Structure formats: C-alpha cells, structure tokens
Amino acid sequence: MIDQPDHVRAEQASRMLTTLLATEPFQADRVKQCIGLHGRRHLLKIVPDASELLEPVVVRKMLRRLVGVCVFPDQLCTIGLSIIELPNAFERYLGLVTSTFADVIGLEYPDTTTAILTQKLADLDPQSPWVDVLTSIVAHLKSNRIWDGLPECKELDLSAEAAATYRSHRRREQREIHEAAEQKSVFAQLSLQLHLKYGRSIATRMGERFGAVTELQHHSIQIELPRSERVDPLAGQLRRLTFIQDGDT
C-alpha cells in the first residue's frame, strides 16, 4: 500500500481516468459519469447510480483498461469490488469479478487482495450470493501461496555438470530480461530513477537572513510489488499493455 496525501492520490486517479478515456472519445461523457473518486484516499470506483448508462460489455472493457493502467493494489481491489454493487451484478458480472480477482489482481498482488477481500466479506450481508464467491477466491489465493511454498520435486534433478550449465544460461537470460524490463518498468523508475532530497528541516533565506526553521515529518512508502515483476517482468508489462489496448478480448 502507498500512503500519500489526498491531492496526490486525486491527481494520480485523474491521470488514470484520462488515459482510460483517451482511446474511447465517443463514450467519454458516459464513462466519466460511471467512474468516481471514492473516499478519502481517492480510490477509483464505478458509481452504481450511473451504471445503467453503460452496457455490460463496456463495463468489462472499462475494468480491463483500468487494471492495465493502475499499479496500486488497493485501487485495483476497490475498482473490482465496486462492480458487485451495480444493479443485477451477480447475474451480469459474476464471471468478470471472479476472473479479475482470481486470475489478474490476485495473481499479481495475492497478499493485498486476500486482505481486502477478507475485510469485504466481514462487511457483506451473510445472505448475499457474493459471500460464497469471494470466500472461494480467498481460499484459491491462499492455496496458491501454500503450493508456492512447497519444496520442489527432486526426482528429475539434472547432473551436476548439466545443472551448472543450465544455471549459467538461466542467469544470463534473466539478466537480459530484467535489464530490458527495467527500462520501461514503473516500479524500477520509482525505486531507481526517482531522485529525492532528504533533510530534517527546511528554512527560507533572504540575503543573509534566514526565516523560521520548519521541521520535516518522516515519510515512508510501502507497496506490494506485482508477482510478475519478480518472476517475469516482460510478461507483466505485456499483460498490462494487452488490457489497455485490447479491452474487448
């Protein structure tokens, strides 16, 4: 999660919305009415009262593009969960919500997705049909983490010489992939190319006189990196590009 001032989150959300609408000018007014900034943290949310202005296929396309543009897991989960509040959502968007959380958001951000869905389950009406759906998604994400943590099978181990050759080739391949991915990676730019000035206090100077000294507050940033950024950066970028450019598939 990233803890930033409200005006920064609002500006980021505005840029996401602008990017989303750039490729669909003829529906810009409708989409603007259907997407709002929700809550103090300015998370994007589909507005239920205006959802009837859009057909289900456009809602699906809109969600895919937002998922392709947005890099903050809390915003992605809020966008996805806002769909279940739309009229007749269970009949119209069951498959969309399930695939989005289980195969896209949950795959990239398993910890954040599990935590937010668990919190949403506590707020839902026990009689809601979405309870079973979200519970199964949470169970699916948790089982994936268990499978990922199991030891690898050793029965088909390579010989020592073949294993050394394979590791050398694999390291060279991974190095080339990461070098190419870092050039376009949003997360690499944040961590490697964003230059910050650190200080404990700040003061204004006019000639030889200094104004009052203002102490600066400590600020920290935490975010769950997408799984593809560690496993296969190019695949993650390709998936986002596909969502942005080809929302109908």
Image (tube, helix red, strand yellow):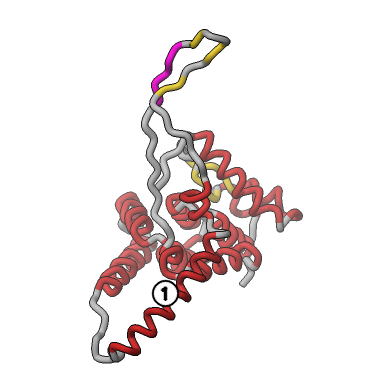
Q: Which residue has dot 1 on it?
A: 171
Nearer to me, 203 or 12? 203
- The residue drawn where x is 25% and y is 85% is 153
Percent coordinates x, y for residue 65 in the rendering: 59, 60
| Residue 25 to residue 229: above or below | above
- The residue drawn where x is 38% and y is 58% is 113
Quarter holding residue 77: bottom left
Q: How many neighbours does mark 1 have within 10 angstroms: few (below 14), some (14-19), or many (20 or more)?
A: few
Nearer to me, 5 or 210? 210
Q: Main secondary structure of the magenta part?
A: loop
**Going by the image, does 220 lie left or right of 61?**
left
Which quarter of the image is occupied by the C terminus?
bottom right
Q: Which residues are magenta?
A: 212-216
Percent coordinates x, y for residue 172 in the rendering: 46, 75
Instruction: Tell whether position 214 is magenta.
Output: yes
Instruction: Tell whether position 178 is magenta.
Output: no
Quarter holding residue 142: bottom left
Percent coordinates x, y for residue 168 in the rendering: 40, 79
Residue sitting at the far right: 26
- The residue drawn where x is 47% and y is 69% is 175
Which residue type does callout 1 highlight?
A: Arg
| Residue 97 to residue 46: above or below | below
Percent coordinates x, y for residue 181 in the rendering: 53, 64
Quarter holding residue 200: top left
